[in-house]
Amino acid sequence: MKQPGRAERLEEASPVALRTVRADARRNLDALLEAAKAVFGTSGVDAPVREIAARAGVGIATVYRHFPQRSDLVAAVFRREVDACAAAAPTLGRAHQPVEALARWLRRYTSFIATKRGLAAALHSGDPAFDALPAYFRQNLEPALQSLLDAAVRAGQIRDDVEAYELLRAVGNLTLATGDDGVLQGRRMVDLLIDGLRFGARAPAASLPSKRRRPQR
């Protein structure tokens, strides 16, 4: 008698079982991408696939099933880090005062830069698999940062003449150092940058003195 294949077994599974399968698959994928990020950061993007699989606790076949080409894996790690960084903006905005949320997000962004630096050899290789990543970066991180900038400007906590993209580039240039000392130095540079943004801040509109003329007696 013919044994049911994987597709038939999934079709016959209960909704609860299907959700469990999907949840397990998502956890495996997250573990794989987190492992790849760590391995790329320490061993470079040419690290053996078996090292990534071992760190993730999955088989090598699982890696190739999700990512047939190494470039697919590198691009997925990059997009995952962009998504996580962008998602942090509204969370921080709800939890902190505007300028504190901005400072915490920029520190979070320095961690993204460290990951991106680990992928640099691949991202700048000319492989067409990476062509869409610069646009993906800007489309997701610029609006995230701009929302924090706008909130801090409205609160009168920072100056109003800075755009998100130029700030992203500035932080990238200020965090070029590598290693543990480089991370600490980068965060210090971000703190100094925030202090600079505070200079020239305008009082929020609600607290500005009224310019309406007093009625003549």
Image (tube, grey):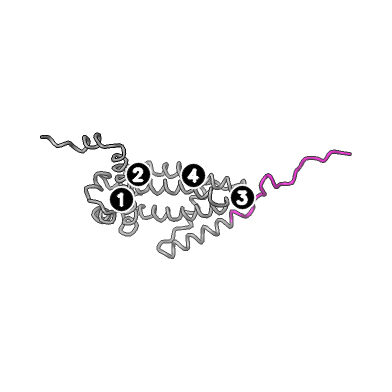
Q: Which residue is mark 4?
A: 142
Position in image of residue 68 (x %, y %): 25, 44
User: Which stretch appears magenta?
Assistant: 196-217
Q: CA distance from mark 1 to mark 2?
A: 20 Å
Which amino acid, mark 2? Phe
Which amino acid, mark 3? Arg
Please name which of the two marks, 4 or 1, marks the residue nearer to the observer: 1
> Element under label 4?
helix
N-terminal of the pair, mark 4 or mark 2, is: 2
Locate residue 193: give its quadrant.
bottom right
Q: Which is the main secondary structure of the residues drawn in magenta?
A: loop
> Element under label 3?
loop
Q: Which residue is mark 3?
A: 159
Q: Which residue is mark 2?
A: 130
Q: Are marks 4 and 3 in contact (CB under 8 Å)?
A: no
Q: Which mark is residue 32?
A: 1
Q: How many marks?
A: 4
